[in-house]
Amino acid sequence: MAELQVEVVAADHFLWSGAATLVKARTSEGEIGVLPGHTPVLAVLAPGELEIVPVEGNRITLKADGGFFSVDSNRVVIVADNAEMQESA
């Protein structure tokens, strides 16, 4: 099964990295959902929630204050101005 390699960092700290099947985020152009095989994208990250569905484990939710969102060759890199992990429900 294809998967995404995801890395999330804030300006001053590392948040999460690993394999995932889905990443959702808000960009300045609207919400984006990324699955394996997605076309390359470089976007401005809008303030809001990020959602990551890891290959193993529970869904991860982060809150970001903006930044950049990049997708290329099944690799997703999110560089946020400021971000923090949200509590699981």
Image (tube, rainbow, N blue to C red):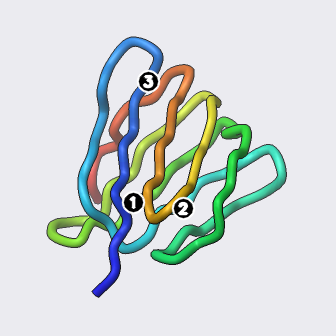
Give me the C-alpha separation between circle 1 and circle 2. 7 Å
Mark 1 surroundings within 10 Å by alpha-carbon count, few (fewer than 14), some (14 through 19), many (20 or more): many
The answer to whether residue 40 is left or right of residue 64 is right
Secondary structure found at label 3: strand
Q: Say what amino acid the circle numbered 2 marks.
A: Lys
Secondary structure found at label 1: strand
Q: Position of residue 86 (x, y in %)?
A: 35, 42
Which residue is disc 1 drawn over?
52
Give me the C-alpha separation between circle 1 and circle 3. 16 Å
Q: Is residue 74 above or below residue 50?
A: below
Q: Position of residue 52 (x, y in %)?
A: 39, 60
Q: Position of residue 30 (x, y in %)?
A: 79, 57
Number of marks in the rendered image: 3
Secondary structure found at label 2: strand
Q: Residue 37 has which mark?
A: none
Label 2 close to label 3 by CB (< 8 Å): no
Image quadrant containing the N terminus: bottom left
Q: Earlier in the sequence, mark 2 or mark 3?
A: 3
* Rendered residue at 21%/65% (across/down): 58
Q: Is residue 79 above or below residue 5?
A: above
Q: Say what amino acid the circle numbered 3 marks.
A: Ala
Which residue is disc 2 drawn over?
24
Q: Is residue 62 above or below residue 38?
A: above
Label 1 close to label 2 by CB (< 8 Å): yes
Q: In the rendered image, which quarter is residue 32 located in?
A: bottom right
* Rendered residue at 47%/44% (across/down): 77
Toward the right, the furthest residue is: 29
Mark 2 surroundings within 10 Å by alpha-carbon count, few (fewer than 14), some (14 through 19), many (20 or more): some
Q: Earlier in the sequence, mark 1 or mark 2?
A: 2
Toward the front, the furthest residue is: 73
Q: Earlier in the sequence, mark 1 or mark 3?
A: 3
Which residue is disc 3 drawn over?
10
